[in-house]
Amino acid sequence: MKLSNEKDFLKFWKEKNLSNTDVIKTLTSVASVSNNLSWLFFSAYQCAIRYQFRNLIYNQYTSLAVAEKKNSPLEISIDKNNNNTIIIKGLKTWLVTTNISKIIVFAKLTKPIQIIQKSEKKYWKSLVALVSVDETTKLTPFEKVRYLKKLKQGNIQLNSTLVDMKNIMSGKKIRDFRVVEKYFVMLSLTIFFSLKIKSHRLKKVYHNLGNELIVLLLRKKLNDRTLRPLHKKFQKVFDIFDQIPERNSITDWNADKVLFKFLTK
């Protein structure tokens, strides 16, 4: 199957129902049809979001919206006409794709906000909100990107966008997202390498590393300490792949490998 553009890839994603599929199957399904790192990053990123923000129910692919312009934080307020709704204003400067209908927006608050959920008062210094794209949101694709060129990355402007209280949660989980994202990127690439590589000896090395990574997931022990020993092994197999002919079949390998090195450092 040839997935040469984002439209074809997202069609494949929906047809396979990968937003609601076991993460290992999701990563393997994408790795088996990929000839670039854009699709691998997308699948790893979706699995990381699903793992870290599983209390937000969306059942489709999404993007985190975290980055913003310096000194331009989002404005968050409670709707005066409905205490069960918050209002979001401002710009988030990066989305994994602009072909999207649900976005998880992170906001660091200038002062704590009182949230009432299930009749319980809570005071949060940050939050994440599941935003539905509507007439109050404007998604703008970037004209040029340096990495992951197959994905139509862009930004989102929120103009008094309303979000129900049931679709928000504390922003604390954003702290550990970097580690979770690193894990799924490592696992996604390891699966991909094991499928691409021709040497039976090396294929076994990649399979063994993949199994060790999966054990961490099954034991629910994804943190810096548990990931550190496997990270060293991953860097080694990454460098091995970068030296063998199979790398030449990967579109934009030389550009995107720089990003993946950064994401997994």
Image (spheres, rainbow, N blue to C red):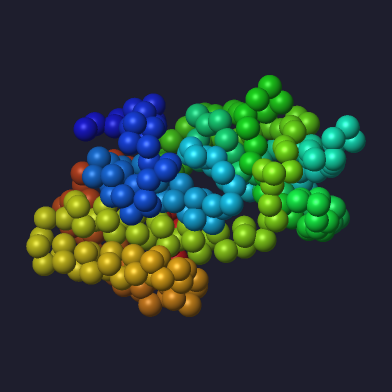
The spot of residue 108 in percent (x, y) is: 74, 53
From this view, report whether residue 225 is shown above or below residue 205. Answer: below
The spot of residue 170 in percent (x, y) is: 70, 56
The mark tally for this picture is 0
From this view, report whether residue 221 is shown above or below residue 97. Answer: below
* Residue 94 shows in the view: no
Report the side of 17 relative to 250 (left or right): right
The spot of residue 39 in percent (x, y) is: 36, 42
Q: Quadrant of the C terminus?
A: bottom left
Q: Nearer the viewer, residue 116 or 252?
A: 116
Report the side of 203 relative to 42 (left or right): left
Looking at the image, the residue that sits furthest to the front is 119
Residue 250, picture quadrant: top left
Report the side of 248 relative to 6 (left or right): left
The residue lying at 65 percent from left, 37 percent from top is: 131
The residue lying at 36 percent from left, 28 percent from top is: 11
The residue lying at 55 percent from left, 40 percent from top is: 58
The spot of residue 144 in percent (x, y) is: 49, 33
Residue 78, picture quadrant: top right
Residue 209, picture quadrant: bottom left
* Residue 66 shows in the view: yes
The residue lying at 21 percent from left, 44 percent from top is: 249
Q: Quadrant of the N terminus?
A: top left
Looking at the image, the residue that sits furthest to the right is 80
Q: Nearer the viewer, residue 222 or 54?
A: 54
